[in-house]
Image (cartoon, rainbow, N blue to C red):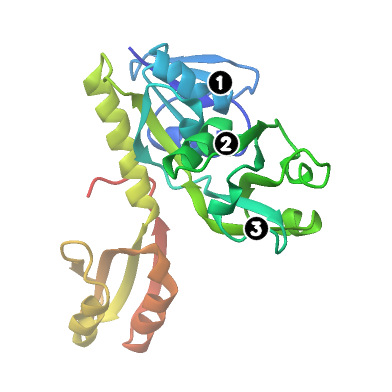
């Protein structure tokens, strides 16, 4: 039986649970549940703190898990990323008082506060920068103002919180993070079940990038219409009861939906419908 760790709370939890549901796995309906068995899929789910998931996977207590790339990098465990899952995006940056530090090299001999000490220490060591890493569990942006550190390293979204604290980002991002499927570095016992999980997750990811587009079009405009929506292999074209019209179905990129609808309407297509795809194998 495949044992999978899932975030029990936080920004990754809801999206991870929904993605697993879309993959056909049973998921908990009560946030107090810590374990859920899905005998039909031969899978057992454990709902754990996101920061702890890489530790359990690395120790082999569970076979796989969903957590943040940043949390994996900070865990220092024998777990590796297998697949990016396309949600929970964040950017990890350095920041200091505006105008005081402009390059990562200037951190040498200074104090850097962060909630991700392993990630930051490894990053600095990899660049030959000797700095003191100060671990904090929260409110990292206040560390400089309170005199605990000279700079911070933290997740940055809009930068509003940093600016309010008188800080400005500098240097390149340490890490661009997202939710990831992880596994133990030396492999897992039930390889087939893990590959099935990864394949289903990949199918949901692919499906999220495409939609199904159906429309009716005059026979004389079919060639122009299908050139707009060529589909993945080829669109499906079927005759309608009205002999002068045909129905067309094609898979198209979700990001192009409205542009394609405009172009189809211009060549005479009508009854244009768009349907989300929950899962796919392409």
Q: Residue at x 27, y 78 (%)?
A: 228
Q: How many marks?
A: 3
For residue 103, which quarter of the picture?
Answer: bottom right
Q: Which residue is mark 2?
A: 14
Q: Where does the image place residue 181, in percent across and percent down from the top left?
A: 39, 33
Q: Residue at x 39, y 46 (%)?
A: 278
Marks 1, 3: nearer the viewer: 3
Q: Secondary structure at mark 3?
A: loop
Q: Which residue is mark 3?
A: 101
Q: Which residue is mark 1?
A: 48
**Front one among 101 and 265:** 101
**Residue farthest along the front direction in this orientation:** 109
Q: Secondary structure at mark 1?
A: strand
Q: Where does the image place residue 182, in percent across and percent down from the top left?
A: 38, 29
Could you tell me if residue 107 is visible in this image? yes
- First along the sequence among labels 2 and 1: 2
């Amino acid at each position: 039986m495949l044992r999978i760790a899932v975030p029990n709370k936080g920004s990754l939890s809801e999206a991870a649970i929904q993605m697993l549901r879309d993959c056909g796995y049973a998921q908990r309906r009560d946030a107090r549940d810590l374990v859920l068995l899905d005998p039909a899929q031969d899978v057992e789910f454990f709902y754990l703190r996101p920061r702890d998931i890489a530790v359990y996977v690395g120790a082999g207590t569970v076979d796989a898990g969903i957590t943040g790339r940043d949390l994996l990098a900070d865990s220092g465990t024998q777990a590796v990323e297998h697949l990016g899952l396309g949600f929970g995006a964040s950017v990890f940056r350095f920041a200091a008082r505006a105008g005081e530090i402009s390059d990562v090299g200037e951190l040498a001999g200074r104090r850097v506060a962060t909630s991700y000490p392993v990630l930051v220490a490894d990053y600095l060591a990899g660049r030959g920068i000797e700095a003191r890493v100060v671990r904090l569990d929260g409110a990292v942006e206040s560390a400089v103002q309170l005199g605990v550190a000279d700079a911070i390293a933290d997740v940055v979204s809009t930068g509003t919180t940093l600016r309010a604290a008188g800080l400005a980002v500098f240097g390149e991002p340490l890490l661009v993070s997202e939710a990831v499927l992880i596994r133990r570095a030396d492999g897992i016992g039930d390889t087939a079940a893990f590959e099935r999980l990864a394949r289903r997750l990949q199918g949901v990811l692919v499906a999220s990038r495409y939609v199904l587009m159906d429309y009716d079009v005059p026979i004389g405009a079919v060639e122009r219409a299908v050139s707009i929506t060529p589909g993945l292999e080829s669109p499906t074209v079927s005759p309608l009861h009205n002999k002068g019209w045909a129905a067309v179905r094609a898979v198209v990129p979700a990001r192009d939906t409205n542009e394609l609808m405009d172009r189809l309407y211009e060549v005479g297509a009508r009854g244009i419908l768009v349907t989300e795809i929950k899962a796919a194998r392409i």
